Image: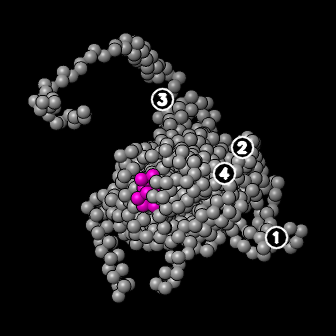
């Protein structure tokens, strides 16, 4: 007894064509609750829309005036720049910290643990204030031999500008959280992968970078996307440094000047939503890239004909080479 | 060259001398001695927990040994002897030793994010610093050899278990090892896929590759094996010509095991 492919004519044991089976046409289960829910939701949304249009306190005219304001647009630019730079710093450090945490070298493991403990254990606001005050703490940074001669020095105030302090504060704090996300990702990769690569004679650093991390990224990207969107909003804390060019500071400034906080909150919320949406699009493509072979099973572009031809050609070359050696 | 080759074929390529292995308190290997000559197919069978996989994994340092010595081509595996003491090899030195030894795993362990051909060229490019074109040509040739020339662009998830295992064999061969270790290569396969993998291994044996094979395939042992070793409880119970051991086992434990698997 075998299962018949649907496009083949079905035959019974004596070889006669069997009649086509009567296909099932069942009555689906009805869901009146879903319809009721949809109606309630629709009515609620209609009411909300009506209030958005008719309530004069929203001041849509002010929203319109300031949505493309120079200060607001510049604020978006700075907020994006802070987000990107802090995340680049945080991701770089997190990869390093996660690798260190899995290292055979106990010194690396301790340093990584201590880093996460410290930067995760103190509030980001405190860290931002501290980075803003670092030039008070250490007015001069000099490089030299401890207790010996000084090689060169520079003024901390020139080096650690407000923007730099903001990126440092946000990035170092975030690196501690991301390090744990990366560690979880690395741990999620099957142990057989490490063994297979080791058996091929690959060095550990290369295995981590080329075999383990790319597979871990499948697990790492979604929470990292979460953290990036979180970071976008956390940049509003850079006031603590103080750094005063970001989107929240810009809209707050206008609101305080015009005594109209609600429309400017709407302006800020609108732009944060737009940026978040763009980040989500980026995340989609990153996830698709690292899902290769698992979630995303589009075959790599190797044409079967090319492959067979190349294999034959290679074989021919190999055979010729062996003949040559024998001669 | 031919002269040294002939001399060498008489020597053992792999020498396992008095090897013990403890996992904590658990004494897994209890003094194993075993030689594998160049070009020989050495098959190890035994019940689960007998230590046969552990022994195999000690040969390429997937596990470290607790006592004894393992030599491959007269090179001590995992240690350097100096000043009357053994010194651990560095990661770089261990990797260098492993390059000469290919390994095939029960669970294939292909890299899921790489296609069949990418799996095969990874180590030749990264470790042996071959050019991408050369590694690729060699990979396609190997895929052809294991009967998968038309699967080069497939990801492991798009291949059957038997196909994955054949890609894994090709991947190990791409490093041109002098010794191949097979750790129950067909145990995770559906019965109808076992034959394809075994026939690739048979061809490999015919080509003169030195192989140590841990398996439950008694038929393969009888047909392809040059020696058969039966292990139980961390010791070698019986070893010899496969047809002899299978047809006329001398020890009660061997008889009992074979009566269950045959």
- Give yes or no for contact between labels 3 and 1 (Cβ–Cβ under 8 Å): no
Q: Chain of mark 3?
A: A
Q: Position of residue A141 (x, y in %)?
A: 79, 63
**Residue that badge 4 annotates:** B28
The stretch of residues the image draws in magenta is: B218-225
Q: Chain of mark 2?
A: A
Q: Quadrant of residue A140?
A: bottom right
Res A120 label: 2
Q: CA distance from mark 1 to mark 2?
A: 31 Å
Ranked by sequence position, the earlier of labels 2 and 3 is 3
Quick check: do tags 3 and 1 share a chain?
yes
Neighbor class of circle 4 (other Cα within 10 Å; few <14, some 14-19, many 20+) is: many
- Give yes or no for contact between labels 4 and 3 (Cβ–Cβ under 8 Å): no
Asked whether B160 or A87 is in front, the reply is B160
Dot in front, 4 or 3: 4
Residue A50 seen in the figure: no
> Which residue occupies the extreme left position in the image?
A16
Q: CA distance from mark 4 to mark 3?
A: 77 Å
**Residue at image location 29% in from the left, 72% down from the top:** A313
Dot in front, 2 or 3: 2
Q: CA distance from mark 1 to mark 4?
A: 56 Å
């Amino acid at each position: 007894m075998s299962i018949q492919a649907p496009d083949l004519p079905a035959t019974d044991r004596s070889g006669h064509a069997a009649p086509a089976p009567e296909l099932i046409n069942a009555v689906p289960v009805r869901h009146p609750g879903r319809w009721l829910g949809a109606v309630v939701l629709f009515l609620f949304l209609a009411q909300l829309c009506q209030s958005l249009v008719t309530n004069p306190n929203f001041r849509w005219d002010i929203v319109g005036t300031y949505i493309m304001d120079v200060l607001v647009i510049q604020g978006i630019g700075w907020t994006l720049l802070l987000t990107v730079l802090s995340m680049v710093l945080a991701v770089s450090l997190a990869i390093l910290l996660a690798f260190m945490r899995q290292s055979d070298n106990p010194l690396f493991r301790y340093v990584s643990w201590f880093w996460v403990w410290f930067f995760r254990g103190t509030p980001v606001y405190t860290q931002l204030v501290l980075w803003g005050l670092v030039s008070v703490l250490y007015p001069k940074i000099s490089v030299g031999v401890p207790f010996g001669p000084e090689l060169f020095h520079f003024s901390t105030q020139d080096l650690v500008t407000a923007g730099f302090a903001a990126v440092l504060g946000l990035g170092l704090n975030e690196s501690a959280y991301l390090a744990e996300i990366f560690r979880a990702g690395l741990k999620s990769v099957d142990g057989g992968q490490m063994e297979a690569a080791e058996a091929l004679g690959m060095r550990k650093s290369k295995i981590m970078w080329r075999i383990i991390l790319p597979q871990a990224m499948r697990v790492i990207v979604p929470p990292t996307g979460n953290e990036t969107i979180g970071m976008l909003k956390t940049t509003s804390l850079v006031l603590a440094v103080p750094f005063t060019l970001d989107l929240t500071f810009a809209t707050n400034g206008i609101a305080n000047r015009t005594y109209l906080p609600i429309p400017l909150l709407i302006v800020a919320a609108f732009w944060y939503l737009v940026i978040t949406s763009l980040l989500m699009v980026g995340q989609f493509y990153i996830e698709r890239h690292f899902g290769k072979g698992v979630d995303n099973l589009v075959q790599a572009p190797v044409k079967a004909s090319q492959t067979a031809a190349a294999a034959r050609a290679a074989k021919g070359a190999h055979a010729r080479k062996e003949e040559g050696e024998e001669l | 060259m031919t002269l040294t080759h002939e001399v060498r074929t008489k020597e053992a390529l792999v020498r396992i001398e008095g090897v013990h292995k403890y996992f904590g308190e658990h004494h897994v290997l209890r003094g194993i001695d075993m030689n594998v000559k160049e070009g020989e197919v050495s098959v190890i069978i035994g019940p689960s927990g007998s230590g046969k996989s552990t022994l195999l994994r000690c040969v390429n340092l997937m596990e470290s040994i607790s006592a004894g010595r393992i030599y491959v081509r007269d090179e001590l595996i995992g240690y350097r002897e100096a000043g009357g003491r053994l010194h651990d090899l560095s990661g770089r030195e261990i990797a260098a030793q492993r390059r000469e030894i290919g390994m095939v795993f029960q669970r294939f362990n292909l890299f899921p994010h790489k296609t069949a051909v990418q799996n095969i060229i990874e180590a030749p490019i990264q470790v042996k610093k071959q050019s991408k074109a050369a590694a690729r040509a060699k990979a396609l040739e190997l895929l052809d050899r294991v009967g998968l020339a038309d699967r080069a662009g497939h990801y492991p998830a798009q291949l059957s278990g038997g196909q994955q295992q054949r890609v894994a064999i090709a991947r190990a061969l791409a490093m041109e090892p002098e010794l191949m270790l097979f750790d129950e290569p067909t145990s995770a396969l559906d019965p109808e896929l076992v034959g394809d993998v075994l026939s690739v291994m048979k061809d490999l044996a015919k080509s003169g590759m030195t192989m140590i094979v841990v398996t439950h395939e008694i038929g393969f042992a009888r047909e392809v094996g040059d020696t058969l070793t039966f292990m139980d409880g961390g010791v070698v119970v019986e070893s010899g010509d496969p047809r002899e051991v299978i047809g006329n086992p001398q020890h009660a434990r061997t008889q009992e095991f074979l009566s269950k698997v045959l």
